Amino acid sequence: MIDFEEELKKFHPSLEVEDAEEAIYNQDLTDMADLMVKIVKESKKTRVE
């Protein structure tokens, strides 16, 4: 059985669109392009050595 009072204690309201956008842009996230650049740079270093 679901304890609604307990579930309400866990609830966190969602951010407004502007606040969510700001929170997302302020995070330093690595994307696939960043990973590929890092891999290529590291592979070039190991070839030269």
Image (cartoon, rainbow, N blue to C red):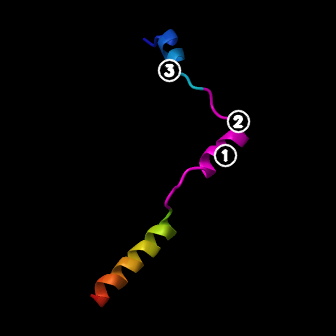
Q: Amino acid at mark 2?
A: Glu
Q: Cα distance, mark 1 to mark 2?
A: 10 Å
Residue farthest toward the front in the current orientation of the protein: 49
Q: Are marks 3 and 2 in contact (CB under 8 Å)?
A: no
Q: Is residue 43 magenta?
A: no
Q: Secondary structure at mark 3?
A: helix
Q: Residue 43 versus residue 8: which sits nearer the camera?
A: 43
At label 3, counting other C-alpha atoms closer than 10 Å, the crowd grade (few under 14, some 14-19, many 20 or more) is: few
Residue 32 image point, x, y percent: 48, 66
The residue stretch that appears in magenta: 13-30
Label 2: which secondary element: loop
Q: Is residue 11 left or right of residue 35?
A: right
Mark 1 or 3, which is nearer the eye? 1
> Which of the two discs, 1 and 2, labels the residue nearer the N terminus?
2
The image quarter in which residue 45 lies = bottom left
Q: Tell me if residue 24 is in the magenta stretch.
A: yes
Label 1 secondary element:
helix
Q: Can you identify the residue that label 3 sits on? A: 10
Which callout, 1 or 2, points to the residue nearer the camera? 1
- Residue type at mark 3: give it: Lys
Report, in whole angstroms, how far the alpha carbon at label 1 lies from the one at label 3. Answer: 24 Å
Instruction: First in sequence, mark 3 or 2: give its number.
Output: 3
